[in-house]
Amino acid sequence: MGAKYRLRQALGFFDPRVSAASRELAIRRLNEDEQALFRRQSPADQRHALAVYAAAQDAWPEDEALHIAALLHDVGKGRPGIVDRTGLTLTQAIAPWLLFRWLRHPPGSRRGRIARLAHDTVNSTRLAELAGSRPDVVEALRCYGFREHASGRRLAELDAQH
């Protein structure tokens, strides 16, 4: 991902304003447990999810699974701080193999948190399953980025743009 995308991402972390009305309108599409997952995200991640959601609605208005997956695609991150986010970005760019090694570190350690942050898609999928998400939503999350899966491919494309 380019420097422009990363800069926009970092600035969004410091200005995570989200209209309460737009947030509430979007999350009405979620079941109660999915809403709890969405709300526990950081404001910056909520803002990002709402941007991906809006883009999904515009581009593929008929793909309801994609719309819901857009709202939930980052719930597996938890609430990482700017230091962990920056650490992940730098590690992915310079030495991505370290992320596998760091999975052996305790989850509360800096390296453990960064390694687990790199696996947010797997975590988001599992949390959506546990929240009772529809099977097609879980499948869209599970197939994030797979060219052969329409919703998974679309979700990754929209995520990269927003």
Image (cartoon, rainbow, N blue to C red):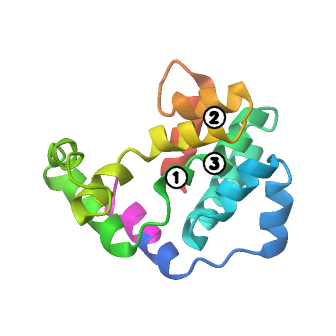
Between 50 and 106, the one lying in front of the other is 106
Calculate the distance from the C-alpha at mark 3 to the C-alpha at mark 2.
Answer: 11 Å
Does the CB distance between marks 3 and 2 fall below 8 Å?
Answer: no
Which amino acid does the dot numbered 2 rest on? Glu
User: Residue 129 got which mark?
Assistant: 2
Residue 11 versus residue 100 in the image, above or below: below
In the displayed structure image, the side of residue 18 where residue 102 appears, left or right: left
Residue 87 versus residue 54 in the image, above or below: below
Q: Position of residue 117 (x, y in %)?
A: 37, 53
> Does any portion of residue 64 appear in the rendered image?
yes
Calculate the distance from the C-alpha at mark 2 to the C-alpha at mark 1.
Answer: 26 Å
Q: Nearer the viewer, mark 3 or mark 2?
A: 2
Q: Based on the displayed image, in which of its 4 quarters is residue 51 positioned?
A: bottom right
Q: Could you classify mark 1 by the number of other residues whose Cα lies within 10 Å: few (under 14), some (14-19), or many (20 or more)?
A: few
Q: Could you classify mark 2 by the number of other residues whose Cα lies within 10 Å: few (under 14), some (14-19), or many (20 or more)?
A: some
Between 8 and 103, the one lying in front of the other is 103
Q: Which secondary structure, mark 3? A: helix
Q: Nearer the viewer, mark 1 or mark 3?
A: 3
Q: Which secondary structure, mark 2? A: helix
Calculate the distance from the C-alpha at mark 1 to the C-alpha at mark 3.
Answer: 16 Å
Q: Which secondary structure, mark 1? A: helix
Reading the image, the residue beneath label 1 is 161
Count of numbered badges drawn on the protein: 3
User: Residue 44 got which mark?
Assistant: none
The residue shown at (63%, 48%) is 72
| Label located before the other in sequence (1 or 3) | 3
Reading the image, the residue beneath label 3 is 72
Which stretch appears magenta? 1-9
